[in-house]
Image: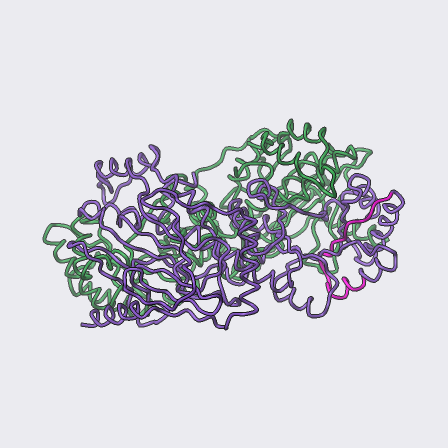
Chain colours: A purple, B green
Amino acid sequence: VIYSPLLTDQYQLVMAYNYWKLGMAQREAVFHLSFRQLPEKCDYLVSAGLESVIEFLANFQFSSSDLSYLKKLQTHHAKLFSADFLDYLEQLTFTCDLHAIPEGVLSFAKEPILRIQGSILQCQLLETPLLNFIHFATLIATKASVLYSAAQSDPIIEFGLRRAHGPDGGLTASRSAFIGGCSGTSNALAGKLFDIPIQGTQAHSWIMAFPTELEAFRSVAQVMGNATILLVDTYKTVDGIKHAIEIGHSLQKEGHELAGIRLDSGDLLALSKEARRMLDEANLPHTKIIASGDLDEDIIRYLKSQHAPIDSWGVGTRLVTSYTQPALNAIYKLAAIKNSEGNWDYKMKISDDPQKLTLPGIQQIRRYSNQRDIIYNIRSDETLPSGGSDLLQPIFCNGKLVYQTPTLHQMRETCIAQVQAFSEHAPKPYPVELGTQLRAIIAHTTQSHEH
Amino acid sequence: VIYSPLLTDQYQLVMAYNYWKLGMAQREAVFHLSFRQLPEKCDYLVSAGLESVIEFLANFQFSSSDLSYLKKLQTHHAKLFSADFLDYLEQLTFTCDLHAIPEGVLSFAKEPILRIQGSILQCQLLETPLLNFIHFATLIATKASVLYSAAQSDPIIEFGLRRAHGPDGGLTASRSAFIGGCSGTSNALAGKLFDIPIQGTQAHSWIMAFPTELEAFRSVAQVMGNATILLVDTYKTVDGIKHAIEIGHSLQKEGHELAGIRLDSGDLLALSKEARRMLDEANLPHTKIIASGDLDEDIIRYLKSQHAPIDSWGVGTRLVTSYTQPALNAIYKLAAIKNSEGNWDYKMKISDDPQKLTLPGIQQIRRYSNQRDIIYNIRSDETLPSGGSDLLQPIFCNGKLVYQTPTLHQMRETCIAQVQAFSEHAPKPYPVELGTQLRAIIAHTTQSHEH
């Protein structure tokens, strides 16, 4: 279902039809996917979502039920699409070139995260799905990275499936959050599909299903032994901690240790300090304290600044929905098209609002070890400073996959290493410059448009 | 993939295991799914998401790859789950009773949207997926309803796929938005899967792919005839309108009409008035004006109050992400459990925060024609006022589907009719009362807890 080429806006199909009718279907074009601005509280983006893009493009094929659906569509009492166009779609496969920034690598506003080159018809159809895949995954990977920094590298477990935007929204959130620095997820299906460590504790309903909290604690300890984690805030938290200590001592007698307690409400600073003191005094120094309950980066940063003795953090809704900013300004814009003479015409969206200007050319990004990036046009005779390396990697060449996807664990390591280097060494805001030749193209395009 | 029972939190699996180990797997329990509060800017919720729940439950079965995954899981160097538990899961199917408020029907804070009764092990495993399905769909259906009211029943087209939270997030958003009152979607796959009308216009890239705007307009009109809709804001909007009028006149000569123009940026009030005046003066009174561009309910309400001559509204990001409030406080709570003597123990979460109190009992809602609802315990000898009807409908009985799902169009009609009746006749805030016997249970449960 998800990999149908119908996963696009109706107008992409209509424009594809129009290009085809006008004999322009094979006209070569270049589009870039980028973000207009950085998120509100972050100096960078964590690129993510490429794996979905790859799966989608590798399986790009209209099914017979897709075509039957398109055949039925009408507009103003006439068929929307002609039969020969549907025959064309039936044969269509992805044949473009795709370059992309690998997942987990940092990027910045206006930088192309994807560059696609080939048939304008294909590029047009792909606008919506490519934006969908990259935007959401990058949004969540970036949010997770902000949380990871706030928690000063403490383990963060993503707990958000229940309030994520659908099952697949939850899965992509788990995967992206892991790339951005989370240590695990509560989502068991994400664990299976993406090899992410899964973790969890205990729900209030468990406690409520037993006559008393102590009985509920004892029952779980009986089954889980060393892996027992007790949720202590169902009734009165301090009583809950006392009951947990009682269980901790019983476990000790059997040669076990109480793995942890979870605080899910109340004044987490005061409660975590009290819990740590009580556990330590009760000779349970190895019992961890896990905090959860509508946590976000601001709360975690505050609790860290006050030295709350919290060992790991469960973050759900605020992470998987990117609650404070549930969408970013991701765009996908035409930047070059071959004219009827076979020469490249560079294209940019001109706007009174400088934020809405888009960059022309066939772009690549050169990064100089965390000091600056230069976006340049690969077809210009650009003399770039020495050193540095290009960020956009070849993914598909004439529709053929040429990229070996790293493991999710490698992406996460890349991200964490880059964030650390960025935090320590990079100037902020990070300088993203334009190559001399690209600037010349912009000046020329703007000027020619004003005439 | 999506219908695996692994689509749940790890702790649900662990608790299921514990219940099973303790011989409590078949203990009968009752859970309700409800929303703690209403959304910030709406007096009601539009219930949605039941169809996903039904599909999930009807297909509830651990696959062999799910079981292999669970078998591998370790904790503290031991297997997390015993082999005989995995054998149990292999045989597990859904055997509970489910009652639900049908999709498109209005509901209110604290009212159970779902009630599930049966094996506590099954109820526990289902907490996360049921919340995931109902929360997101209800969130978006409600948001769409707010937009529909703001637009005073003008057609709203959902344009959000590109910035929705994943492909499936986009599909569920399209479906839910339609239930809530949208007239169509740009999402072609949603059109195919859910029989929602799909609509669209033209992208900036189309305009940019041609040497001039006029040429771009002429090309599309050549193919689309009567169905031509022109995006007029790529360069200078007023020039764009002039060009559109030129095309409108050419189309008239061929016996066609220009279907519409789209305004996607700028001062939509001034531009729509200017566009309407220009179109009318040019003898193009039937050419519609479509507005889009980061629209939300506040902007639409303002434009309607100023009599902006806009015929239909394209709303994307702000709708499909529920931008101003991307998650609500949906909860799923134990409300009753049979004790070892086979009698019902009623359960409620006690909290210092009255918002966090949950209701005990086996609940049903009786609605009195838009004047009030009464939540009551079906096992009490409750004498309810006459009139009114129960909202929770039987969906599964002992795991067997007993419900005939209405069509999506019927759900949308239900919603629109209910919203209209609610707006005209219901007292606000809408009174949701508790039955006398339910209040007695609460008093008793609270009291017994304090002792």
Number of numbered tags placed on the structure image: 0
**Is residue B175 among what the camera can see?**
no
Q: Position of residue B294 (x, y in %)?
A: 40, 62
In the image, what residue occupies the spot 81% across and 46% down? A217
Residue lying at the far left in this picture: please name it. B253
Q: Position of residue B250 (x, y in %)?
A: 12, 56
Residue lying at the far right in this picture: please name it. A253
Say which quarter of the image contains residue B307: bottom left
- Given residues B321 and B397, the one toward you in this image is B321
Residue lying at the far front in this picture: please name it. A386
- On screen, residue A391 versus residue A89, left or right, reads right
- Given residues B257 and B55, the one toward you in this image is B55
- On screen, residue A52 versus residue B314, left or right, reads right
In the image, what residue occupies the spot 28% across and 40% down? A73
- On screen, residue B210 versus residue A281, left or right, reads left
- Given residues B108 and A211, the one toward you in this image is A211
- Given residues B167 and A197, the one toward you in this image is A197
Which span is picked out in magenta?
A255-275
**Is residue B129 among what the camera can see?**
yes
Residue A118 lies in magenta, yes or no?
no
Q: Position of residue B154 (x, y in %)?
A: 35, 56
Q: Position of residue B311 (x, y in %)?
A: 30, 58
